Image (tube, rainbow, N blue to C red):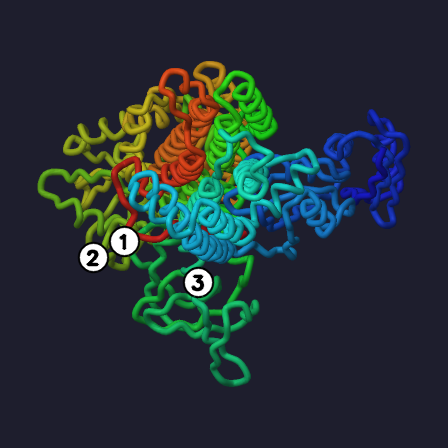
Amino acid sequence: MAVLRFEVTGMTCGGCAGRAERALAGAEGVTSASVNLANRMATVDTDRPASDLRDTLKAAGYPAAETLIRLTIDGMSCASCVGRVEKALANLPGVLSARVNLTTQTADIEVLTGTVTAQTLADTVTQAGYPAQALEDDSTPDAAQRQATEAAALKRQTLIATALTLPVFLGVMGGHLIPALHHWISATLGQTGWWGVQFVLTTLVLIGPGRRFYRIGLPLLAKGTPDMNSLVALGTLAAWGYSSVALFAPALLPDSARDVYFEAAAVIVTLILLGRWLEARAKGRTGAAIKHLLNLRPDLARVERDGGTVEIPFADLQKGDVLQIRPGERIATDGVVLTGRSYVEESMVTGEPAPVEKSTGAQVIGGTVNGAGALRVQAEAVGADTVLSRIVAMVEQAQGAKLPIQALADKVVLWFVPAVLVIAALTVGVWLAFGPGLTHALVAGVSVLIIACPCAMGLATPVSIMVGTGRAAELGVLFRKGEALQRLDSARVMAFDKTGTLTEGRPALVRSVAATGYDADTVLRLAASAEQGSEHPIARALEQAATDVPVPEEVTAIPGHGLRARVEGQELLVGNARLMAREDIDMTGVSDALHEMETAAQTPVLVAVDGIIAAAFAVADKVKPGARAAIAALKHQGIQVAMISGDARAVAEAIARDLGIDQVEAEVLPEGKVDVVRALREKFGSVAFVGDGINDAPALAEAEVGLAIGTGTDVAIESADVVLSSGAVAGAVNALHVSRAVMRNIRQNLVWAFGYNVALIPVAAGVLYPFTGLLLSPMLAAGAMALSSVFVLTNALRLRNLQSALGETPAHTPAIPQEVAA
C-alpha cells in the first residue's frame, strides 16, 4: 500500500470535491480517500497504480493534474539499461509512465502532480546504477553538446587503450606469425617476463579506459540485474583473472592449461571502446535536423532601449522589445512590423520560395530572413513561445517516442542478459565435461559473454525515429506523435477533406471564354471594375484575376441576378444566365462554354457589353497545385483515396473527377465526418484523414492517423498526429513515404540485431568446433559486437538522404506552420 497525495483539477465547489472523493473511494484497491477543495489536493491510500486513479478521476469529470519531468541519464549502453531504468521509475508511486531514450540519454516521466519530485526520480535512477540529473522546468537537454562530450571522452579513452594494447597484441600475434619475433622475445624477456609485461599493460587498460565497464557492470551484477557492461566486465575479468593465476600461481593449473589471455582482455576493451566511440559519433548526426533548426535563430538581436540601440543575446529578449532588422539579417523572434517595408524570405515557415511583402502591421516569424528593406519589429513571442521553439519541441517529442514495434525488443531484452549468463555458464560446463579442457572452456565462455550484444536491439528503433522525424521536418512533415510513424505505415485508405485541403478554400477564376470579336482579358478588366463595390466572394475572384482595373462610372445591383454598370463609357451587364435572359441577351456565342462550366460544377459569370454577350468566366474553388500528382502518387502506392465534403454532390463529384478520386462522400455535415471515417475503416481498414478546419477536428481524432494542413486552424492542428506545414497536399504523400521508409529501416535494424545474436551466440559457444576444429576468438567476438551497433546506426543514418516522394528536393529549411505558435 502507498499513500499518494496529488492535485485534482476542475473542482469549483464542495459538491465537486465530494463527487471526486466518492469516485476515488469507490475505486478498486483504494483503502481510503479524501479530497480537499481549498488546496485542491487528494490523499489516497491504495495499492493500485497511479494510472488507475487518473482514469477514475477523468471518468468522474475531475481530471488529476499531470506533470512531465525530464531527466538526463549517464551510463546507459544497451536496451537492457533502458528497460532497467524504466522499470525502476515505473515502480515509484505516482508515476504514470516513463519513456527512456537510449539515443539521447534522456527520460520523460509523467507523474501525478505533487506525488513525486524530479530529484526523487533522479535519485531512483542513480540508485539503479545510472547517474541521473533532473532538468529544470521548460528546459531541454543540449543533446548535441552531451553527445559531443561523450564522443570526445570515448575517443580519448580509445586512443589510450589502443596505445597500451598495441604492444601486447603485436607481441602475441606477431610471435605466432613470425617465429623469429617469438624467439627474440623469449631470449630477451623470457616467458615469465613477457607475461609480466602483458599483465602490467593489460591491467592499465582495464583500470583506466576500461574502468567504465566495471564501475557500472559489477554493481548491477551484484544486485542481480546485469546489463551489457556486466557481460563485458565478466568476460574481460575472466580472461585477466585466469591469465593472472597462470602467471603468479601456475601450480593451481594443470600443465596443459598454463597459458595467458591478457591480449584478449585488452583487445576486447579496446574494440568495444572503439565501437562505442563510433556509435557516439553516429548518434551526434542523428539530431542534425534539430541542430539545423536551432541554428536558424540568431545569437544576437538589435533592440531599442533607453533611447538608443543595443545588441543583446537572444536569451535576454523580452516580449514588447522593439527590434531593428537590417537588410539581409535573420529576424530574431516572432513579432509585428511597426515601421518599414521589405520582402521577407519565409520558406522555412511556409515552404513557399517566393519572398513575402511585409509592411506595418504584418506578422514576422523568428528565423526568417529579411530582404532589402529595413524593419522595426515589436517582439510578440520570445523563448519557448516562438514558432521555432515550438517546432523543435514537437520534433523532439516525436523523436523520444516508443513505437509499438519496440515492445517485442523490450520483452526480449528484459531476459536477454540473464539468459546470456546462463548460456555462458552452460558453455563452460559442457566444455569442461566433454571438451579438450579448461582453456577451451574459458575461451568459449568468454566469447559468449562478449559477442552477446543487446546494444543493437536498444538502438534499432530510437535512432531510426530520430533520423526519420528530423528528415520529415525538413520535408515539411511534422510528426507531433512518434506513434503515428507506425500507424501511418499500416494505413489502407487516406481520406481528404475538400475545402481548404484539396482546394484553396476560396473562389478563384478558373476559366475565361470570350465571344467572337472580344478579348477575354479586356472584358475581365471591365467586369472587375463593375464588381469593385461588391463584397461577394465571386466579385473578389474577378478582381484578383484582373489587372489595371478602372473606376466604374455607375453601378446598380440587381438582386439575385447580378449588376448593371457603366465603365469607360460602355454599358455592362455582369451576372448569371437569368440576368441575360431577362435582358434578352443572346448567349449563343458562349453557350457551349456555359454548358461545360455547369457540367464541371463551376459557377459561370456572364458579361454583356452594350447589349451583346462578350464573355463567360468560370469561378470555382480552385484545386491546389500538386493535388492531382499527390493523389496519383497515393493510388500508385496502393492507397485507397477518398474525399469527404459538405458541398453539393455535383460539385464534389466534379472535383473528384478532376483529381482522379473514385470514393466520394458529399453533403456530409461536420458531425457526419466521423461516421464516414468509421465506414471507411470497416470497408478498407486503417484510415488516415487529412483536414484543415475546426469541423475536421473530430475526424482527425477518430482516424488512426490525423494529418492537419499547417495553414489550417489551431484546433485541427492540436487534434492531429501529423502536421503538413506547407499546406500542400504533397505533404500527405511525403508523410506516408517517410513513415514507410522509417518502419522499413526499423525492421531491417531489428532483423539484424536479433539475427546477429541468434546466429553468433551458438558459434561463440563452439557448436562448429566438432566440424572445423576452431573456436571463435574473444577478440573477434568483441569486434563483431562493436560492429553490430555501428551497423544499426549507419543504416538509420541513411534516412537522412530520404527524398520527397514526388521527386522534389526542398531547397529551403524546414517548413513550420504559424499556427503552431498559438
What residue is pinned by disc 3? 297
Q: Residue at 40% x, 72% y: name it.
A: 325
Classify 158 as above or below 421.
Answer: below
Q: Amino acid at mark 2?
A: Glu
Could you tell whether 394 is left or right of 120 in the image? left
Callout 1 environment at 10 Å: few (<14), some (14 to 19), or many (20+)? Answer: many
Marks 3 and 1 sit apart, C-alpha to C-alpha, by 45 Å
Q: Is residue 83 left or right of residue 291?
A: right
**Side of 794 relative to 585 (left or right):** right
Residue beneath disc 1: 529
Q: Amino acid at mark 3?
A: Arg
Task: Say which of marks 3 and 2 sits in front.
Answer: 3
Looking at this view, is 324 or 127 the one in front? 127
| Quarter of the figure with residue 36 | top right
What residue did someone put label 2 on?
A: 568
The x and y percentages for residue 51 are: 72, 33
What residue appears at the point 17 percent right and 33 percent down from the top-left corner? Answer: 590
Classed neighbour count for the residue bearing mark 2: other residues with Cα under 10 Å, few (<14), some (14–19), many (≥20): few
Residue located 36% across and 63% down the image: 369
